[in-house]
């Protein structure tokens, strides 16, 4: 099988690329290496893959590059490229989110509509589409009501997938990832900031009162679901599935677990809650279990231990 992975140098994308190569796939790893965070960190994520004989790394922007050559010979597209982050999606930065999350998705879907041998396009969506209004745990039938511009752009990408599935037969599956964590996590995300602060002996800047609840999902579980969505037969085009870790956890609980794993409490710097940050997320993953045969396997404590180990091994030498 030959895959195109967009956003291949990111946290989830690079983990997916490594898993595909280990499973015997050929991979075209596409990334624009934007400055959403340090491009050097993204390039480091692909160091091992770039030397693999079955992997080709392509630096390209989906908004501007001709896409037909990238799709040549491809069986499955994993569309993970996006402008990430809730807090930065307001005001002046919104245009960049529209370009990366909506325009790029539409261009890719348009190209896929002319790729007759494509077996599946897997779109990485987000629990951010639900906002604060959905019932808990949220099912895919809940009415989405995004609480941030970022969530709006991810929902727009889902709607584009459905439109191209219904009108052009593009075999799309959209996966709503719930707070992914683990090795290579983006440096702006809460667990990465928490672990870095704990390792450095600094106070963790905590936005809000610590009572926020998140349904967190370990990156290897997310990658397993993403690969299953690519190869499971008889999944209808336009399908949407929650990919959730199986239980919501308070931020203060994660802070406490990291302190226990580090052998000392983590100090906290109290900061105001930020616009767009929802109070709670919780996902019902019944559809993923039924349609994809997928279930999460890594609990929060084990996942945090693995992420701490990765952060320790990647700290700059002092």
Image (tube, rainbow, N blue to C red):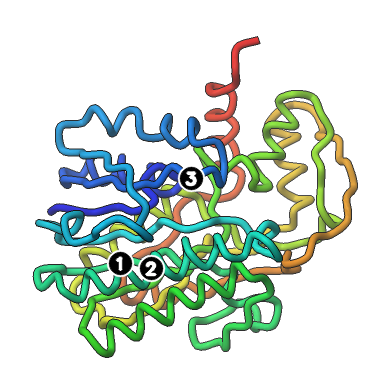
The residue singled out by tag 2 in the image is 105
* Quadrant hosting residue 304: top right
Residue 60, compared with residue 289, is above or below; it is above
Residue at image position (21%, 64%) is: 231
The residue singled out by tag 1 in the image is 108
User: Split into 4 quadrants, where in the image is the N terminus?
Assistant: bottom left
Cα separation between marks 2 and 3: 16 Å
Residue at image position (53%, 60%) is: 245
Residue 175, compared with residue 21, is above or below; it is below
Q: Position of residue 270 (x, y in %)?
A: 90, 47
Residue 200, compared with residue 237, is above or below; it is above
Cα separation between marks 1 and 3: 18 Å
Q: Nearer the viewer, residue 296 or 270?
A: 270
- In primary-sequence order, the first of circles 2 and 3 is 3
As helix, strand or loop, the secondary structure at mark 2 comes to: helix
| Left or right of 124, for residue 184 | right
Q: Nearer the viewer, residue 136 or 279?
A: 279
Residue at image position (43%, 42%) is: 33
User: Split into 4 quadrants, where in the image is the C terminus?
Assistant: top right
As helix, strand or loop, the secondary structure at mark 3 comes to: loop
Cα separation between marks 1 and 2: 5 Å
| Left or right of 17, for residue 125 | right
Residue 166, compared with residue 160, is above or below; it is below
The residue singled out by tag 3 in the image is 34
Q: Are the residues tagged 1 and 2 within 8 Å (C-beta)?
A: yes
Counting other residues with Cα less than 10 Å from the Cα at mark 3, is it few (<14), some (14-19), or many (20 or more)?
few
Q: Position of residue 168 (x, y in %)?
A: 22, 85
Residue at image position (35%, 28%) is: 47
Q: Position of residue 109 (x, y in %)?
A: 29, 72
């Amino acid at each position: 099988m030959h895959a195109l992975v967009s956003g291949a140098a990111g946290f989830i994308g690079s983990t997916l690329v490594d898993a595909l190569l280990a499973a015997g796939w050929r991979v075209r790893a596409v990334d624009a290496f934007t400055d959403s965070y340090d491009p050097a960190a993204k390039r480091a994520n692909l160091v091992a893959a770039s030397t693999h004989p079955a992997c080709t790394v392509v630096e390209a922007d989906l908004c501007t590059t001709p896409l037909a050559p990238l799709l040549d010979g491809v069986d499955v597209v994993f569309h993970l490229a996006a402008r990430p982050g809730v807090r930065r999606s307001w005001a002046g930065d919104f245009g960049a989110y529209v370009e990366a999350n909506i325009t790029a998705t539409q261009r890719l879907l348009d190209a896929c509509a002319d790729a007759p041998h494509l077996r599946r396009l897997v779109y990485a969506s987000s629990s951010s589409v639900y906002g604060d209004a959905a019932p808990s745990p949220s099912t895919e039938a809940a009415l989405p009501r995004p609480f941030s511009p970022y969530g709006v752009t991810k929902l727009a990408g889902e709607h584009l997938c459905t439109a191209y599935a219904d009108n052009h037969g593009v075999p799309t599956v959209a996966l709503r990832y719930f707070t992914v964590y683990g090795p290579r996590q983006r440096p702006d995300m809460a667990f990465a900031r928490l672990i870095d602060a704990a390792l450095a002996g600094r106070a963790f800047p905590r936005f809000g009162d610590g009572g926020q609840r998140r349904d967190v999902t370990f990156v290897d579980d997310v990658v397993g679901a993403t690969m299953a969505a690519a190869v499971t037969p008889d999944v209808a085009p336009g399908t949407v599935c929650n990919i959730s870790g199986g239980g919501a956890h308070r931020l203060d609980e994660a802070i406490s677990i990291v302190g226990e794993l580090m052998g000392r409490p983590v100090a906290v710097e109290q900061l105001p809650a930020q616009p767009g940050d929802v109070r709670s997320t919780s996902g019902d993953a019944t559809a993923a279990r039924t349609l994809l045969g997928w279930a999460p396997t890594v609990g929060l404590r084990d996942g945090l231990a693995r992420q701490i180990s990765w952060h320790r091994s990647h700290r700059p030498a002092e």
